[in-house]
Image: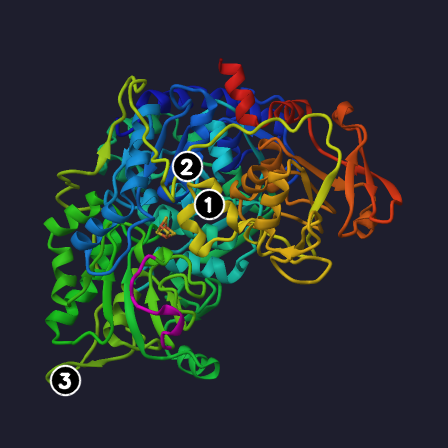
Amino acid sequence: MAFDIEMIKGVYSKMAKNVDKAREVVGKPLTLSEKILYNHLWDGAPDKAFVRGKDYVDFAPDRIACQDATAQMALLQFMQAGKSKVAVPTTVHCDHLIQAKEGAATDLKHANNVSSEVFNFLESVSNKYGIGFWKPGAGIIHQVVLENYAFPGGMMIGTDSHTVNAGGLGMVAIGVGGADAVDVMAGMAWELKFPKLIGVKLTGKLSGWTAPKDVILKVAEILTVKGGTGAIVEYFGPGALAMSCTGKGTICNMGAEIGATTSTFGYDDSMERYLKATDREDVAEEANKIREYLTADPEVYANPEQYFDQLIEINLSELSPLLNGPFTPDLSTPVGSEMTGKAKDNDWPIKVEWGLIGSCTNSSYEDLSRASSIAQQALDKGLKTKAEFGINPGSEQVRYTAERDGILQVFEKLDAKIFTNACGPCIGQWARYSDPKNAPKNSIVHSFNRNFAKRADGNPNTHAFVASPEITAAIAIAGRLDFNPMTDSLINENGEEVMLDEPTGWELPPKGFDVKDNGYLEPEEDGSHVNVVVNETSERLQLLTPFEPLGDTITGAKLLIKAFGKCTTDHISMAGPWLRFRGHLDNIANNTLIGAVNAFNQKTNFVKNQLTGEYGGVPDVQRQYKKAGIKTIVVGDHNYGEGSSREHAAMQPRHLGVAAVIVKSFARIHETNLKKQGMLGLTFANENDYDLIQEDDTFNFLDLNEFAPDKQLTLEVVHADGSKDAIKLNHSYNEAQIAWYNEGSALNLIKKQNA
Ligand code: F3S
């Protein structure tokens, strides 16, 4: 089952009715984003207009995609839901855990050795619960999704920020945390704040050295890394129509770099061509039948300023290639001489050591073919490449076809390393150095999306610049950051001056796509007999035990930590080396809150153990409270839990025995995650009460037995000298969420309902 045409027909069959109704309730013509959103309401046909940027709305996504790093905890949780199958078509893609070093064959073998237990676990869970499984080496999640599952007008969620890539095929596709994905897998609604809408009108036409990548690099320059927050970016205009589908994917992909909820394009001929080329003629046929519902209404295109919250216009005919970086994807410099001075002023190494082509952003057949047209010129014109080349094809289908068509061989002749069809250097899975922390200062250019310090190779001194694949190839050949292929010549091996011609390539393979083994494993129809094996001694995986309800009496609780200032999900559950424990709750819990600053001594990971009077690390102290059967609370400042949506930041404290998190204010996703794990996530009714909390305090909830929506809770704070304060706490639990609390977690409740 590469894709589910019946599901797609189902989405399309209600689209006309729902969109017409939505137009009526909203009272004006609709953008494409609104059409897709209103056609995916959990409660069915729209009966009221939602306020953008304000209303929280329940949606019913069509698909879920998970990658191997995030799927572990998501699926461990799903196993708790008591379901025999996922409620919504789901796929798992093994792409993050494969290190790039020697080249595909050796690297893949190595990954299969070191991560076999994770891959085997994911494969068996997928097989058991009806989840499509893409083996290591099958490709990068978002390229595989675009090739197989994305469809115009669909809604998808995925446990990876670049899920948004599927907007290239006209979807509303959004990256979420594992807990959200589990809800949808288990048959629940998915909640999202109705996004604001940013319109990007593309006029003119790309030509010469300019590529779709330059469009998003330009948008990143305009909007910066935060400018898209809470919004869907909708692209339209003649420039959009003239662009390939995978090029649109590149633009949507990097919408994550401007913080956008997602990005999308209206259905057009390029999408139809792509669907047909990827063996989905039937999807194209169905989409053609409701074409007008898969783009914005004509009035929107005519007067976009009336329908979008913000409007940007870019003339593609005037756009020139850009190089964004280092260390942030929104710092743009036009390719060429401007970089000479900028690099000198900022002390960026002008010499380029690597050119990396690939990642989910730019690893399509078109990308590889255009970059190879530049590489071929190096061979034809007697140029010796100054930097090394690394290539990550986006999928086995792209790799196989590119090899058949001689594209990869061009790079190989330049001594390029063809890495596995996987994320590799894009996620720091690149064994470039034996000691990255002490590696030398250098510059690299890549066609990826993120270029934060250490992202590619762990070296804080690597200056990574983002460019299109064709510019990456040209700069790697020249070996200089400030090379401008449109104006600069190079000296070849015979001492002659030569210029690089403009790139050429194919939007789609002229002989069609081909693949021998795409790496897909279809799950069994009935997986009830499939055994999911998790070794009890495993360091990386641990089956979950359902959380016990905390009950309606919490007294004698101790303070674990009063966090001072910023406390993000990274402070609560650090990433980096801890990533390897993402599937092992008890092991990863050893990083719980180690990044949070203790308000009483301004130190991290140094809190008082009230049982002994001694100070110790947060997880150690908490484990001692747990052993003694004492519940604890965590106190925090404003926007507690901002950052990522990772559910570990809620599961870990819960696992260790923290009962309540009481803060001045929450980042909403984290607050919901706490609720889902059956904890108390509360806010001070009077912010100043934060100052009342002392290091030796003991806490008694006085009216938890009356826990109800819109009713404050009262907390008695008993200080070390015996004095007491009774403080009021607010909460945002609704009835359903209180039921999660009462059952111990949302999953416990689902399981009970399924029993
Ligand atoms: Fe992988 Fe990098 Fe994309 S980590 S999913 S290739 S952003």
- Residue that badge 1 annotates: 587
Q: Earlier in the sequence, mark 1 or mark 3?
A: 3
Cα separation between marks 2 and 1:
9 Å
- Residue that badge 3 annotates: 496
Check the image and name the residue furthest to the bottom. 495
| SS at mark 3 in the image | loop
The amino acid type, in three-letter code, at marker 2 is: Gln
- On the rendered structure, is 177 left or right of 288? right
Q: Earlier in the sequence, mark 2 or mark 1?
A: 2
* In the foreground, 421 or 270: 421
For the N terminus, the image quarter is top left
Q: Position of residue 306 (x, y in %)?
A: 60, 43
Q: Position of residue 519 (x, y in %)?
A: 21, 38
Whether residue 234 is visible = no
Residue name at image x 54 percent, y 53 percent = 570
Q: Which residues are magenta?
A: 429-440
Q: Earlier in the sequence, mark 2 or mark 3?
A: 3
| SS at mark 1 in the image | helix
The amino acid type, in three-letter code, at marker 1 is: Asn
Whether tag 2 and tag 1 are in contact, CB under 8 A, the answer is yes
In the displayed structure, 754 sits above or below 210; it is above
The amino acid type, in three-letter code, at marker 3 is: Glu
- Residue that badge 2 annotates: 542
Check the image and name the residue furthest to the front. 612
In the displayed structure, 322 sits above or below 97; it is below
Residue name at image x 23 percent, y 45 percent = 137
- What is the crowding at mark 1: few (fewer than 14 residues within 10 Å), some, or many (at least 20)? some
Q: Position of residue 395 (x, y in %)?
A: 24, 45
Whether residue 338 is visible = yes
Q: Position of residue 580 (x, y in %)?
A: 39, 49
